[in-house]
Amino acid sequence: MVKEDENNQAPETSSNGLLVVKNLTKRFGTNVVLDNVSLTIEKGKTTIVIGPSGCGKTVLIKHLLVLLRPNSGEVYFKNRRIDNLGENELNRLRTHYGFLFQGGALFDSLSVFENIIFPIKQHCEITSWGQVEELVKAKLAMVGLDGFQNYYPAQLSGGQRKRVALARAIALSPEVILYDEPTTGLDPVRGDVISELIMKLQRELGVTTVVVTHDMTSAYKIADRIIMLHNGKIIADGDAEHIRNYPHPVVQQFINGQVSEDDLAVLRMSGTISQAQFLPRDFEQ
Amino acid sequence: MIEMVGAKAIGSVDNVGRFARFVWQSMTASLKSLGRRQTYPLIWTQMLVIGVRSVPVVMITGAFVGMILGVQAYDQLRGMGLEERLGVLINISVVKELGPVLAAVMLAGRVGGALTAELGTMNVTEQIDAVRSMGTNPVLYLVAPRFLACLLLTPFLIIYADLMGILGGFFVSVIVKGINSQPYWSFSAAGVELWDVSIGIIKGFFFGGAIAVISCYKGFTCKEGAHGVGQACTEAFVASFISILALDFALAVIFKAIYNTFWSLKGLV
Ligand SMILES: Nc1ncnc2c1ncn2[C@@H]1O[C@H](COP(=O)(O)OP(=O)(O)OP(=O)(O)O)[C@@H](O)[C@H]1O
Ligand SMILES: [Mg+2]
């Protein structure tokens, strides 16, 4: 599973790959975000995607359920090519997925309760409301928000919204869960609880998990495998130990949170802060 | 330069194609949602928001149209000694053209603006992607109920506008200007045919459908940010207004042809 070479882009063909990305390239205008990326995500495992802000992590996992379509390359789910399917067929497939958006993407005209039952209402025949209420209660309890059923997203804090969105993503008990920065914006304790929840879902239900994160504590804790994206390519791929000892300077700087000499030079070059600042006018006069 | 013109041309052909696809999807999704019990509550909600809450503004619009026509036309007709025909003039204008068109314009502003802003905000905050990510077709969930509500309720709103226009005209002509109410109504009844009233109402389906589809499309294709949403709303209103007028023109031509071939035969039978 551990790949040595950073240029190794050969499409993996292992048959236990639940999700396979082959030679995926994605451009927005002239901005090449993903450059010939290949990746196999194994069933029942937790894969972590790390990388600097803006390197295309969100774009990559959006391709896994074809919310974005590649410019070239292929995406497979259960050995079936999905990137060229029509929206109707994709919608059927997407019921196997849970997707946590980076910004939560809660429906702001619906209450927390209605948000969580949205996927249930869309895809299941609801026979007993008591059962549904129990389920919502259980899912909210998992993210520590039981009792917030009747709140609207605007009444919640950023971290609370994120957790409601997480509860919504797991409402249908999906086979694959894609989390876009699940612990960002949470306090360290709550972040750890969410990491535990992700592990629990993976352990107990055998959920295939992909997590985009900047939170290395959480990453080391839950990862079966970590991949690092940089400049549109995968530059490192392996288990936590492998990444920790990976000699590539960009990887080491990233996981240790160190700024590079080049970045520091830019800061030094920009002069002292007071020179560069525009002071607000005094409106009192 | 030529490249730019070419790119613009390709861009607009592209847009027309995408819009046509969206219209097609909205219509098929609406038909499909009529067969799905889950969508009925959504349709009811939209009917309340779009239809019921628009009744007051549409009635006010209608009443003013009737009253203004009364005030403007009275002097001219009196000069010719034809003031008792005022009723025909007012009522036929209200029922056939001004009631439907002005009610639709009012709706384009009130309903269309709200639809574009709502869907546009949902688009830029990834809520539409969220609908997709949970395996639901956003056109089915978001557009179909709004489209159906607009389509079904605009004709009713036009009936309200017509009624108020007729009352407004009556108020100015008979009560304020003192025209004899007996000839006022009998000339109106003779001059306004069922045909005239019906085409005014049938226009409502087209106007309502156009407002809904255009506004939803603008919301779905809205650009990022507060500015993007605002711009989408403006564009939606302008596009709806122009299509209301264009549809009105096209329907006038079509209905005239139909009238000439069929309705006139009725007298012979
Ligand atoms: N819809 C879009 N249109 C144009 N460019 C886009 C779009 N979405 C993403 N991009 C570009 O793709 C690049 C990667 O974006 P992405 O959101 O994947 O970053 P990220 O790795 O998730 O960053 P972060 O950690 O800050 O969330 C960015 O440079 C961005 O400008
Ligand atoms: Mg991101």
Image (cartoon, coloured by chain):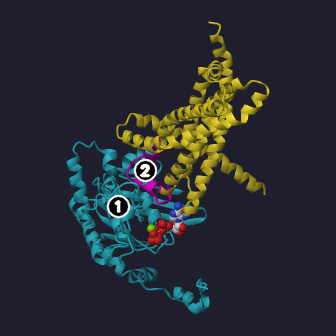
Q: Which residue matches tag 1? A: A165
Which mark is in front, 2 or 1?
A: 1
Q: Position of residue B156 (x, y in %)?
A: 51, 33
Does residue B251 appear anywhere in the picture?
A: no
At 70% from the left and 52% from the top, the residue drawn is B8
In this rendering, position of residue B73 left or right of residue A185: right
- Image: magenta residue range: B122-145
Q: Could you say which is closer to the camera, residue B215 or residue B174?
A: B174
Q: Quadrant of residue A142?
A: bottom left
Q: Earlier in the sequence, mark 2 or mark 1?
A: 2
Q: Quadrant of residue A63?
A: bottom left
Q: Amino acid at mark 2?
A: Ile
**Chain letter for the part of the structure drawn in yellow:** B
At 63% from the left and 46% from the top, the residue drawn is B239
Q: Position of residue A153 (x, y in %)?
A: 37, 61
Q: Position of residue A180 (x, y in %)?
A: 39, 65
Q: Could you say which is closer to the camera, residue B39 or residue B79?
A: B79
Q: Amino acid at mark 1?
A: Ala
Q: Which residue matches tag 2? A: A82
At 29% from the left and 52% from the top, the residue drawn is A172
What shade does chain A have?
A: cyan
Task: Name the secondary structure under disc 2.
Answer: loop
Task: Name the secondary structure under disc 1.
Answer: helix
Does residue A284 appear anywhere in the picture?
A: yes
Q: Position of residue B198 (x, y in %)?
A: 58, 25
Q: Main secondary structure of the magenta part?
A: helix
Q: Could you say which is closer to the camera, residue A49 or residue B148?
A: B148
